[in-house]
Image (cartoon, rainbow, N blue to C red):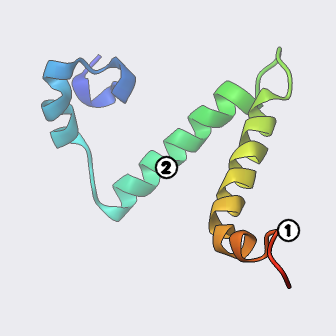
């Protein structure tokens, strides 16, 4: 298909500059890209007919890592080895 319809993983290295120039970096374009990425993630990992809980567990693991990163300073100040 046309270059602008191809996903990033199907674009060759020589075509990357041209592919990036066809992308829309407006707020609507970025919102559309986020929506397409979320739909793709759901179609691949969440709404599968065969498979296990891999998509949901990956989402929960990402949430745990993200929340730990946000609270890292709080955890390091209140570690078990330091006096209260």
Q: Position of residue 7 (x, y in %)?
A: 38, 27
Residue 62: x, y in percent?
68, 47
Image height of 2 relative to 31, above or below: above
The answer to which of 62 and 13 lies nearer the viewer is 62
36 horizontally vs 4: left or right: right
Residue located 19% across and 29% down the image: 16
Q: Which mark is residue 80?
A: 1
Q: Where is the N terminus found, in terms of image quarters? A: top left
**Residue 22 to residue 11: above or below:** below
> In this figure, which residue is indicated by the disc labeled 2?
34
Identify which residue is drawn at 35% across, 53% down.
Answer: 29
Camera-nearest residue between 73 and 29: 73
**Residue 74 locus on image (x, y percent):** 71, 76
Q: Quadrant of residue 23?
A: top left
Q: Secondary structure at mark 2?
A: helix
- Determine whether the residue tagged by mark 1 lies in a helix, strand or loop: loop
């Amino acid at each position: 298909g046309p270059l602008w319809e191809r996903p990033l993983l199907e674009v060759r290295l020589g075509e990357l500059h041209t592919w990036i120039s066809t992308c829309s970096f407006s707020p609507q374009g970025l919102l559309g890209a986020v929506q397409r990425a979320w739909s793709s993630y759901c179609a691949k990992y969440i709404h599968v007919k065969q498979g296990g809980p891999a998509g949901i567990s990956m989402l929960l693991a990402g949430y745990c890592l993200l929340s730990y990163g946000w609270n890292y300073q709080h955890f390091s100040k209140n570690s078990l080895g330091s006096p209260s």
